[in-house]
Every structure is written in structure tokens, then in C-alpha cells.
Image: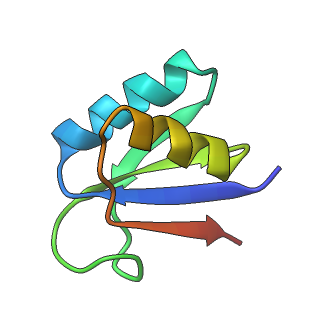
Amino acid sequence: MNRYTIAFTSVTIALKAQSVLRSHDFFTEIIRTPRNLASGCGYSLVLGGDIEKAIDYLERAGIKYKAVMENR
């Protein structure tokens, strides 16, 4: 299963995103955003599964994200 990191501007938004995705059976972990993904401070979710579905759920919930990266 592929793993992805989705960057957000704050821990509050990351927590909201985590709640939305967990309600759709995604396992997520909150981390500090890696420097190679975004500049400045922020938080990210690491998750596995269908990234297109995850992004769709976030967009439907009105949650904005900064960037998405596939983990290798």
C-alpha cells in the first residue's frame, strides 16, 4: 500500500482532516511537515490507501491543504 503525506497550515486543520479521514476508515498520523514538502511551520498527515478518495473527502469537508507527497 502506498503511503502519502498531506501538508496543512496548522495543527488545528490537520486535526480536522484527521477526524474526517478516520471517519472514512483511513489510519492517519500527525507529524510536523517535512522541510522538503513545504516551507515554514505546519503539520501534516501521513496515511496509506487511496489518496484520490482521501483528497475528495477533504475537499467535500472544505478542508484546504498545502501539498501532497508520495512517501518512498
Q: Nearer the viewer, residue 46 or 56?
A: 56
Q: Position of residue 1 (x, y in %)?
A: 83, 49
Q: Position of residue 69 (x, y in %)?
A: 55, 69
Q: Nearer the viewer, residue 59 or 30?
A: 59
Q: Position of residue 40 (x, y in %)?
A: 16, 75
Q: How many marks?
A: 0
Q: Nearer the viewer, residue 27 or 67?
A: 67
Residue 15 left/right relative to 21: left
- Picture residue at 61% right of the left edge, 29% below the top: 26
Q: Nearer the viewer, residue 55 or 49?
A: 55
Up the image or down, 38 lies above or below 43; here it is below
- Picture residue at 32% right of the left edge, 65% below the top: 66
| Way the structure is coloured | rainbow
- Picture residue at 68% right of the left edge, 55% below the top: 3
Residue 33 left/right relative to 47: left
Q: Quadrant of residue 47?
A: top right
Q: Quadrant of residue 71?
A: bottom right
Q: Quadrant of the C terminus?
A: bottom right
Q: Position of residue 6 (x, y in %)?
A: 45, 57
Q: In this view, which residue lies farthest toward the front?
A: 60
Residue 48 left/right relative to 31: right
- Picture residue at 52% right of the left edge, 49% below the top: 46
Q: In this view, which residue lies farthest toward the right?
A: 1
Up the image or down, 36 lies above or below 66; here it is below
Q: Quadrant of residue 49?
A: top right
